[in-house]
Image (spheres, grey):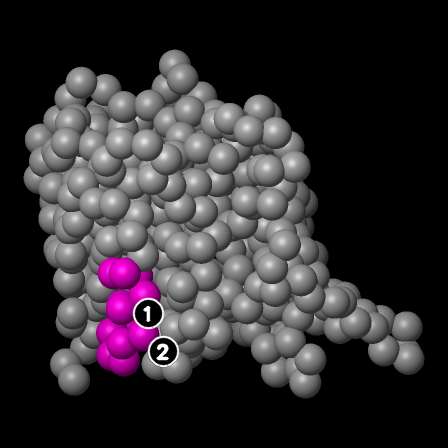
């Protein structure tokens, strides 16, 4: 029973891979991570710093493919914010900050970059709702009424729990900024954007299946739904898809049904099961088409993860161990922690599916996939039953934004 929460676990290399060091007293991973911390910790969160580290290490002759596991993480971890953010909600601290602003800014921003200074001030104040309101009043006193109203509107984003709808249709908010390409983001700007394989084994969750199908289509994904299929059929579909030339931006595989011991359960009677690691491995660099290797792959397993066999069997089944891991640019999302069951209600939705679908509809316009998962974890913490979702990232070197409503003409 995994009770680990708000925990980041960082590995220097993939399963089955050795970690190397050089004659100058540094490991390959240590060199990359330390430089990324020094260069980017003032601006990027831990996950983004890890992405940068993976990007740096992808240029090395020896490929280690670092991995990050997030266990029930519900918010970002920003190292530089420890100096300012935790106390920025106090007016006396804000006053000190303003009185000594040049000293603070000199530690993070080049002296001749006025735009960066202004961006930093707005960012730090807007982390807290009360501080943001105070900045609105400052803008009004400076005859910046239009800017004050715009900031006031920004500050109305809800902090309370989302009120869940039982209707299948949720409207995805359109993004205003296209975050695609360059060194920081995965390319996500085509229409269709990507492909979704959605496997469902429970007829009573038809509402959830229909909702996710509609959500992804709103974000320009083509969706193939497979209901009540055996593991052999699932495997055949995965193999065929992975072997095809892939011209879209992203691949998503979602499973909604029963599971245990790091396996999913197919339809029919008896032990019709398949290892989760076998599913993911079909899209490894070794098995997938070359056109899919550089694209982001997302796996969502909305199923129970309780343990029915002994620890040795579980260790052999684990996604984390026992095979040479050449899986890259891959997100693996679990609806619950190891040893825990995933629950659903009589309204036709799982607890995880309700939270995740609403977070996509509400926040995919501004948030990356990792941030959407944080939001989902935060929502589920308000539930009576604690599932503690987890995300594994395997050699992720940039952020993934869905960019709903925006695309480039090809």
Q: Secondary structure at mark 1?
A: helix
Q: Is residue 27 left or right of residue 219?
A: right
Q: Quadrant of residue 140?
A: top left
Residue 289 position, x and y percent, is 36, 78
Label 1 crowd (10 A; few <14 / some 14-19 / many >=20): many
Would you name the residue on which mark 2 appears? 289
Q: Is residue 144 above or below residue 302?
A: below
Residue drawn 42% across the image and 24% down it: 341
Would you name the residue on which mark 1 appears? 242
Q: Is residue 199 left or right of residue 274?
A: left
Residue drawn 79% across the image and 72% down it: 20
Q: Is residue 76 above or below residue 269?
A: below
Q: Earlier in the sequence, mark 1 or mark 2?
A: 1
Label 2 crowd (10 A; few <14 / some 14-19 / many >=20): some
State the residue in front, 356 or 20.
20
Q: How many marks?
A: 2
Boundaries of the magenta span: 236-250
């Amino acid at each position: 029973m995994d009770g680990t929460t708000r925990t980041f676990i960082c590995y220097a290399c993939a399963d089955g891979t050795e970690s190397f060091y050089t004659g100058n007293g540094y490991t390959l991973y240590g060199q990359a991570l330390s430089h990324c911390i020094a260069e980017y910790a003032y601006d990027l969160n831990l996950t983004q710093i890890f992405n940068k580290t993976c990007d740096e290490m992808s240029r090395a002759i020896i490929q280690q493919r670092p991995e990050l596991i997030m266990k029930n993480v519900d918010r970002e971890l920003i190292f530089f914010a420890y100096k300012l953010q935790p106390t920025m909600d106090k007016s006396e601290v804000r006053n000190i900050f303003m009185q000594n602003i040049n000293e603070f800014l000199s530690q993070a921003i080049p002296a001749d970059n006025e735009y960066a200074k202004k961006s930093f001030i707005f960012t730090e104040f807007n982390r807290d709702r009360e501080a943001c309101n105070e900045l609105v009043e400052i803008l009004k006193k400076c005859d910046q009424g239009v800017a004050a109203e715009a900031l006031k509107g920004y500050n109305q984003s809800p902090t309370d729990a989302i009120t869940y709808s039982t209707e299948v249709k949720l409207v995805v908010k359109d993004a205003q900024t296209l975050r695609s390409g360059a060194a920081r983001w995965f390319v996500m700007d085509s229409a269709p954007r990507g492909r979704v394989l959605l496997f469902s084994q429970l007829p009573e969750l038809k509402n959830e299946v229909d909702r996710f199908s509609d959500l992804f289509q709103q974000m320009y994904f083509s969706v193939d739904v497979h209901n009540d299929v055996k593991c052999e059929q699932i495997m055949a579909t995965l193999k065929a898809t992975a072997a095809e030339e892939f011209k879209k931006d992203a691949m998503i595989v979602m499973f909604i049904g029963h599971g245990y011991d790091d396996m999913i359960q197919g339809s029919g009677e008896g032990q019709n099961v398949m290892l989760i690691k076998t599913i993911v491995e079909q899209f490894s660099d070794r098995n997938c088409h070359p056109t899919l290797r550089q694209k982001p792959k997302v796996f969502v397993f909305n199923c129970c993860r309780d343990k029915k066999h002994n620890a040795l069997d579980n260790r052999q089944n684990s996604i984390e161990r026992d095979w040479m891991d050449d899986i890259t640019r891959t997100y693996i999302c679990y609806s619950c922690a190891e040893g825990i069951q995933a629950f659903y209600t009589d309204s036709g939705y799982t607890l995880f599916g309700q939270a995740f679908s609403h977070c996509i509809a509400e926040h995919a316009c501004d948030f990356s996939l990792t941030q959407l998962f944080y939001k989902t974890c935060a929502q589920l913490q308000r539930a009576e039953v604690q599932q503690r979702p987890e995300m594994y990232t395997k050699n992720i070197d940039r952020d993934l934004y869905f960019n709903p409503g925006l695309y480039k003409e090809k």
